[in-house]
Image (cartoon, grey):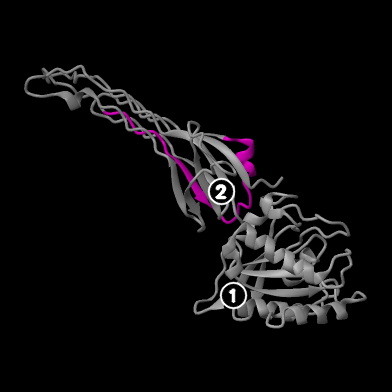
Amino acid sequence: MFVDRVKIFAQAGKGGRGCVSFRREKFVPKGGPDGGDGGRGGNVILRADRHVDNLANLFYEPMIKAKSGGHGMGKKMAGRAGADKIVKVPTGTIVCRVNATDQSHTAHGPREPQPITDLTRDGQEFVLCHGGAGGKGNVRFKSSRNRAPRQYTEGEEGEQGHFFLELRTIADAGLVGYPNAGKSTLLRKISAARPKVAAYPFTTLHPIVGVIEFPGYRRATVADIPGLIDGAHRGLGLGHEFLRHITRCRALVFVVDIAGSEGRNPVEDLQNLRRELDLYDSTLSSRTWFVVANKMDLPGANGNLETLQKRFPNRQILPTSAAKGEGIVAVKQELAFRLTNDEGIVSAAI
């Protein structure tokens, strides 16, 4: 089960209670107060882990609680600190605080919660809820005028709250196209990923990331974004469920069924895909992109390719047949060129 959006409740540990104690030892008259402080409560910590690919663990366990601190003891011994609760989440997880009292709306519906952090690096940590401080023992209250204090304080409550976590797949490039355009087959050919391939639409139900190896021990990650449909920016089909995963990609690869085997016009397909991305997020229009004209082995592909090249004369269009493995080398070379900068191939997942 793939889960990329989940709501959770997190609660940090409570601090331990301070201790009231007096030193009682032979030959030590009037030993005085020696009650120790309570231990701090444990924190709730989110840790990005590249080996975790979705939020299913939090879907089944949405209540996260850290341990409370131990109580103080005599002989000025402090209580044990509560153990931190570390929760592993995928890299690319956005965390938002959900305020139940905030009922504000916009013209388009309820106001979206504001992100408080974005975990984009492997090993990056964020303290979601801080544990409460431990209480003070009676030794803290002694003075020249109060030599036998019996005061102490309770430990503080740990922070708690409701949070919304959303995964946005991190990849260097994204394969974008209509259902059955051949994106999954193409990803199989250029990487070791093995997405499901079948002769019906929407065989891919969640983004799948593959790693492409380049010469010189360089590599890049490519995400197979499930097929889009017209109106996806408004939430039609799976809409935003897919589109938000594209926002992380530095380069976009539009995979077009150049043979029109699904009864669509490839030129209109590319225009519609570009429009859907622009309506969803206008910044996507400025990303580097090129076109993979797939299914060149089918009848009618050559004529449609010429029409597409005339419509987009200044855009790189690569004729391929992913099913037969034709044109795959050119696609990998173009990806290497698009993703290469002064620092070489930058991989977001490794």
Give the CA distance from mark 1 to mark 2. 26 Å
The residue labelled by disc 2 is: 89
Q: Residue, x 69% and y 66% (percent of image)?
A: 274
SS label for mark 2: strand
First in sequence: mark 1 vs mark 2? 2
Whether residue 350 can be seen here: no
Q: Residue, x 64% and y 36% (percent of image)?
A: 60
The label nearer to you, 1 versus 2, is 1
> Where's residue 237, x and y in %?
75, 50
Q: With respect to residue 328, does 257 lie above or below?
A: above
SS label for mark 1: helix
Residue sitting nearer the eye, 55 or 168: 168
Q: With respect to residue 252, does 47 lie above or below?
A: above
Type of amino acid at the residue the image marks with label 2: Val
Q: Is residue 115 left or right of residue 190?
A: left
Q: Residue, x 29% and y 27% (percent of image)?
A: 135
> Where's residue 51, x and y in %?
60, 55
The residue labelled by disc 1 is: 339
Type of amino acid at the residue the image marks with label 1: Leu
Residue sitting nearer the eye, 276 or 124: 276
Part of the protein shown in magenta: 37-62
Any magenta on residue 59?
A: yes
**Rendered-image quadrant of the C terminus:** bottom right
Q: Residue, x 85% and y 77% (percent of image)?
A: 304
Whether residue 345 can be seen here: yes
Would you say the magenta stretch is mainly helix, strand or loop?
Answer: loop
Q: Farthest residue toward the front?
A: 107
> Where's residue 335, x and y in %?
65, 76
Residue sitting nearer the eye, 263 or 251: 263
